Every structure is written in structure tokens, then in C-alpha cells.
Image (cartoon, rainbow, N blue to C red):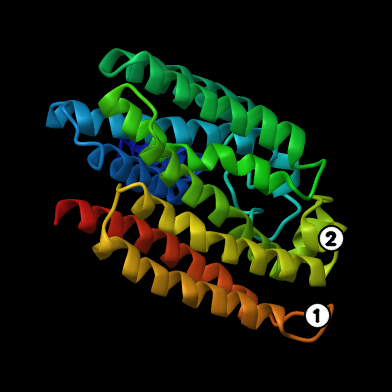
């Protein structure tokens, strides 16, 4: 027969694994993966001088900082997450993680990631990471998200900073080149999230989040999605104009952007005050691929 000690050990192991998985989910791993990638591109294209190990550690610390912001976001928005089909299975609404524990974990990650980044790199990159976490929590999550339909525009500043941080890790500076990477993510963000908010409008309405389809209607939302997609044209060309990238980057990126304009226009031209959910999902899905390919092309252009 198994002893009580063995039984407790066997029961405890799965619980520990599940708890660890829940903590990882609190950090929004999909967002973290995008942060790692865009931060790495900003770092690599700056002609880094750091040792390889320090570089890897620094980028991981930035991702941890982003995870901390995500964790604190879930802590504060647990009441909203419970009301929405897209978020109701997150760790806090399902009871897998205690809300107080999520707060402690988020604060710990914030302090550790910022402090360690300062230790391994410089004050500027640590300050930018701290600014990103605080801006995402206090400006976007606590203030803007429940107040205005422009929440995602202003709040997008936080999500646009990782490549700037990557650049600062290497150079201890902010340049026009790193700002051009920031602008690409910043102007990409609204059309991406407004497309999502179109076909998830019922969710946002239930949670009383003032996304544009709720406050301004479908037609205006479709128009703004198209406008922001068109604004991507000068933004993606900027790195080429300042000699930060070459033709290997700019020509394919223009083609990708023209197609993005097309799918956004296809969504817009649908019947007035109505939208096709399939077209909205297409805009949302392609926007993710579009941003990823932009940064891949930056890397290819730099390495070649």
C-alpha cells in the first residue's frame, strides 16, 4: 500500500504544475512572444556591443516586464474578464489563481525585471521598461480602458516601446531609427484591435467597455480601421527614408501594406452600418501576420 506521504506527493505534483501554468498564463505568453521578437529586432538592428549571454538575459527581462504588465492587467480587470467569452477562462475568473496572489506576482515581476535590467544594461532601458509597465497599468488599464473609445490608441504607446527598449539596451540611447520602429507598432495597433472589437462587440458591451463599435457605431469603426491602415503607408516607408533600411525591406513591405489596405477597404465597403464578421476576422488575422512580417523583413534587410 502507498503511504500517506507518497499519496500527498503524487497529488501535490499535478497541482504545482497546474499552478505554474496558470502563473504563466497570467503573463500573457502570446504578448510576451511578440515583445521578445520586436525587442530583439530593435536590439539586433542597433549593431549591439553586448555579450551574447547578457543580450539574451536582457531581452528575457524585457519580456518578463511585459508579463508583469499583463499580470497586473488581469488582476485589475478580473471583473471584466469574467463577463467576456474571450477572457472568461483566464486564471483569475476560473479561480485557478487568487486575485491577491496575482497582484503580488505582478509586483514582484515588475520590480525584479526592471532592477535586473538596470544591473545588466543601463538606466535608460530600465526606465523605459518601468515606464511601459506603469503606463500600461495606470494609464491604459485603470484610466483609459473604461473611459474612452480611444483607449487603444493612447494605450498603444506601451505596446510600441519594446523595440525602443531593445535599441536602448544596446546603445543607451533613443534614435530616429528606434522611433520609426515604435511608430510602426503604434499606428498598427488601432486597426488591429478595432477589427477585433467589431466581431466581439457583444462582449465589450456586456462588460461596459467603451470600444468604438459601442460608442461610435459600426460605420465609424470601419472608417477608422481603413484610415489607420492607410496611415501605415508613410509609416512603413519612414525607415527607408532615414536610411535605416533598404530596398529588401521597403519593396515587400509596401506590397504587404497595399494588401492590408485592400482587406480593410473590403471590410469598409460592406453595407452601411453593418459588417461581415468573416471580413473583420480576416483583417484581425492578417494584421498579426502583417506586423510579424514587417519585423522579419527588418531583420533580413539588416543581415543581408
Q: Left or right: 261 with respect to 49?
A: right
| Residue at point 29%, 61% (across, down) | 249
Q: Nearer the viewer, residue 185 or 53?
A: 185
**Spatial separation of the CA atoms under disc 2 and disc 1:** 13 Å
| Residue at point 56%, 78% (across, down) | 263
Count residues near mark 1 (Cα–Cα under 10 Å), then give few for <14, some for 14-19, many for 20+. some
Vertical relation: 25 (above or below) 240: above
Vertical relation: 188 (above or below) 142: below
Q: Nearer the viewer, residue 265 or 193?
A: 265
Residue 127 image position (x, y, % from top left): 46, 19
The residue indicated by pointer 1 is 274
- For residue 1, say whether it is visible: no
Quadrant of residue 154 within the rendered picture: top right
Q: Left or right: 116 with respect to 67?
A: left
| Residue at point 46%, 17% (across, down) | 111
Q: Left or right: 115 with respect to 131?
A: left
Q: Nearer the viewer, residue 58 or 259?
A: 259
- Judged from the image, the secondary structure of the residue bearing numbered disc 2 is helix
Residue at the bottom extreme of this rendering: 271
Residue 233 image position (x, y, % from top left): 50, 63
Residue 72 image position (x, y, % from top left): 59, 31
Looking at the image, is mark 2 or mark 1 earlier in the sequence?
2
Q: Left or right: 203 with respect to 31?
A: right
- Judged from the image, the secondary structure of the residue bearing numbered disc 1 is loop
Quadrant of residue 167 within the rendered picture: top left
Quadrant for the C terminus in the image: bottom left
Count residues near mark 2 (Cα–Cα under 10 Å), then give few for <14, some for 14-19, many for 20+. some
The residue indicated by pointer 2 is 214
Amino acid at each position: 500500500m502507498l503511504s500517506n506521504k507518497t499519496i500527498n506527493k503524487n497529488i501535490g505534483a499535478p497541482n504545482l504544475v497546474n499552478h505554474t501554468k496558470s502563473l504563466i498564463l497570467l503573463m500573457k505568453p502570446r504578448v510576451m512572444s511578440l515583445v521578445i521578437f520586436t525587442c530583439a529586432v530593435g536590439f539586433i538592428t542597433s549593431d549591439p556591443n553586448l555579450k551574447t549571454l547578457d543580450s539574451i538575459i536582457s531581452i528575457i527581462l524585457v519580456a518578463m516586464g511585459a508579463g508583469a504588465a499583463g499580470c497586473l492587467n488581469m488582476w485589475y480587470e478580473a471583473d471584466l474578464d469574467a463577463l467576456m467569452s474571450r477572457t472568461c477562462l483566464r486564471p483569475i475568473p476560473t479561480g485557478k489563481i487568487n486575485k491577491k496572489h496575482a497582484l503580488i506576482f505582478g509586483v514582484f515581476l515588475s520590480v525584479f525585471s526592471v532592477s535586473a535590467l538596470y544591473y545588466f544594461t543601463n538606466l535608460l532601458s530600465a526606465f523605459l521598461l518601468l515606464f511601459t509597465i506603469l503606463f500600461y497599468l495606470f494609464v491604459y488599464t485603470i484610466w483609459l480602458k473604461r473611459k474612452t473609445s480611444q483607449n487603444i490608441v493612447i494605450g498603444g504607446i506601451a505596446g510600441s516601446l519594446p523595440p525602443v527598449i531593445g535599441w536602448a539596451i544596446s546603445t543607451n540611447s533613443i534614435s530616429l531609427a528606434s522611433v520609426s520602429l515604435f511608430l510602426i507598432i503604434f499606428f498598427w495597433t488601432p486597426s488591429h484591435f478595432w477589427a477585433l472589437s467589431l466581431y466581439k462587440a457583444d462582449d465589450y458591451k456586456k462588460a461596459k467597455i467603451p470600444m468604438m463599435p459601442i460608442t461610435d457605431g459600426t460605420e465609424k469603426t470601419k472608417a477608422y480601421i481603413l484610415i489607420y491602415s492607410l496611415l501605415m503607408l508613410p509609416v512603413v516607408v519612414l525607415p527607408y527614408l532615414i536610411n535605416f533600411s533598404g530596398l529588401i525591406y521597403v519593396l515587400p513591405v509596401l506590397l504587404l501594406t497595399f494588401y492590408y489596405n485592400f482587406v480593410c477597404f473590403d471590410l469598409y465597403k460592406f453595407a452601411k452600418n453593418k459588417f461581415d464578421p468573416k471580413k473583420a476576422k480576416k483583417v484581425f488575422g492578417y494584421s498579426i501576420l502583417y506586423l510579424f512580417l514587417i519585423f522579419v523583413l527588418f531583420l533580413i534587410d539588416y543581415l543581408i
